[in-house]
Every structure is written in structure tokens, then in C-alpha cells.
Image (tube, grey):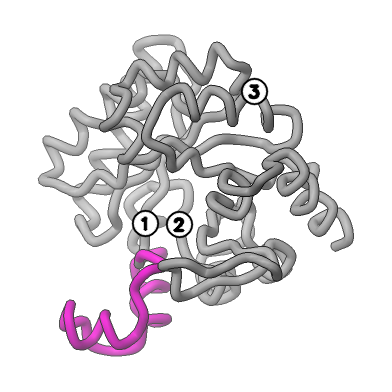
Amino acid sequence: MEARQRIIVALDVDAPEKAVELVRTLKDDVGAFKVGLELVNAAGTGIFEAIRSAGVEHIFYDAKFHDIPNTVAGAVRAATRLGVWMINVHCSGGREMMRAAAQAAHEEATSLGLQPPKVIGVTVLTSIDETILRQELRVPGSLLDHVVHLAQLAQDAGLEGVVASPQEVEHIRAACGPDFLIVTPGIRPLSADSHDQKRVATPSEAIRRGADYIVVGRPITQSPDPKRAARSVVAELREL
């Protein structure tokens, strides 16, 4: 995989015009774009066609579906009709919910003659640390053990991969094998602020540990020169 193809830019903006402009600026320098809850709720699902028309081939719908299996299956079927490349659900919804999501994506894509989207699971958000996990969420054991458990649960349910912080990548890779996709947020170049992310790493650290894709948002999208910022990340990855 080329270095630029590993980069997913998070379009965490509140207006479709901003998203389309970022796509036009960055489409030749990165591999994919992530559309999350802020943008979808601000612009509606028409944003997918808008940014596709701006030149995007790979769109990651960061939906983080988490509901009863039947509801999630229906939501995934609808998202599949949008023609997205990747979509995610919360692993904490359980094996049955994840299995329903994977099956719904495959069945809907097959019925439409489309390539099924890659369905992956969110393990533990990068804004959560060990203290929050134990004291607020009352999850016993270590954060690392919990993340690896959720990754294995996702693999058993038929998902193609997971979203996990850089700190857990090596352990997930060891537990789930070389073909299991790992998408890693919490990516911060050396000069960037970590903002509300608690478990972070540089782009090269994440790939070196075994991530397939890295998600980079504010260090690129809020840069005075987004194109230059993206190319800086590509250059860092090419040195690996």
C-alpha cells in the first residue's frame, strides 16, 4: 500500500461546503475521507454524494452504530446503499449485533451489485483512559485486555477489523493475525496538540506498530495549509 493510501482524513466539520473544499484540496494526497456524526447531522446523508462528486473514491462512514441487532442491521443496509467503502459499529453492542451488521452489509451489497463495505468495530474510544474505563464505566481489568477482547469478539462475529488506539495495535495484531484490519485514530504529528485524545501516537509510530490505516483530523483540516500538512504526514510514512 502506498503511504498516502494509509491516510484517512477526518472531515469533522459542520458544513458541507467546508467538507467539499477539503476533499478538493486533499484528494490527491490522501487515501480516504471519514464522514462522522457532526457532518452527517449538519448536512444530511446527501453529503456522501457531494464529496464523492468532489473526487472521493473511498468514504469511511464513521457511524458508530450501537443498538439492538435488528436496528443496526437496518441502519447498515441503508448505509450500504450510500456506496460507502467502510462503516463501523460499536463492539460493545455484542457478538450478535456485530454479526447482524456484517451480514446486512453483505446481503444488501450483493442485492445491489455493489462491493460490500468493510464493516469494522470500535473497541474503546481514544478519549477514554484506564481511569475512565474503571471508575466511570465500571469495566474490570486493564484497558488493553478489554480492547483485545473486543477485537477478538469482532473477528469472531465476522467483522473485517477494528478501530483501536495506537497503544493497542501490536497486541491486536498478535491476537487477530495479519489480515485483520486495524484503523487507528488518535494520530498526532510531533508538532500537533493532542486535544481531547488521550491515547495518541505519531503517524509513523502507529504504522510501525501494525496499523493498516491512520485517521488524521485536526492536524490536517485545521492547519493553515491542509495540503502541506497532509504531504508532511505522507513524507513521514515514506521514511518507514
Does 116 sit left or right of 188 as displayed? Answer: left
* Comes first in the chain, label 2 or label 3: 3
Residue at figure coordinates x 41%, y 64% from the top left: 151
* Mark 3 element type: helix
User: Gap between marks 2 and 3, in whole Å?
Assistant: 26 Å
Residue at figure coordinates x 69%, y 38% from the top left: 30
Q: Amino acid at mark 3?
A: Arg
The residue singled out by tag 3 in the image is: 24
User: Gap between marks 1 and 2, in whole Å?
Assistant: 5 Å
Q: Amino acid at mark 1?
A: Val
User: Do the residues bearing badges 1 and 2 touch, measured as CB atoms within 8 Å?
Assistant: yes
The residue singled out by tag 1 in the image is: 122
Residue at figure coordinates x 49%, y 29% from the top left: 18
Answer yes or no: is residue 12 visible. Answer: yes
Does 72 sit left or right of 16 as displayed? Answer: left
The residue singled out by tag 2 in the image is: 163
Does 157 sit left or right of 200 as displayed? Answer: left
* Mark 1 element type: strand
User: Do the residues bearing badges 2 and 3 touch, measured as CB atoms within 8 Å?
Assistant: no
Graded by Cα atoms within 10 Å as few (under 14), some (14 to 19) or many (20 or more), the crowding at tag 3 reads some
Q: Amino acid at mark 2?
A: Val
* Mark 2 element type: strand
Q: Position of residue 149 (x, y in %)?
A: 36, 72
Residue 145: say if magenta: yes
Q: Quadrant of the N terminus?
A: top right
Residue 161: say if magenta: no
* Comes first in the chain, label 1 or label 2: 1
Q: Position of residue 83 (x, y in %)?
A: 44, 19
First to last magenta residue range: 125-151
> Which of 50 and 42 lies nearest the eye of the viewer?
42
Graded by Cα atoms within 10 Å as few (under 14), some (14 to 19) or many (20 or more), the crowding at tag 2 reads many
Res 97 label: none
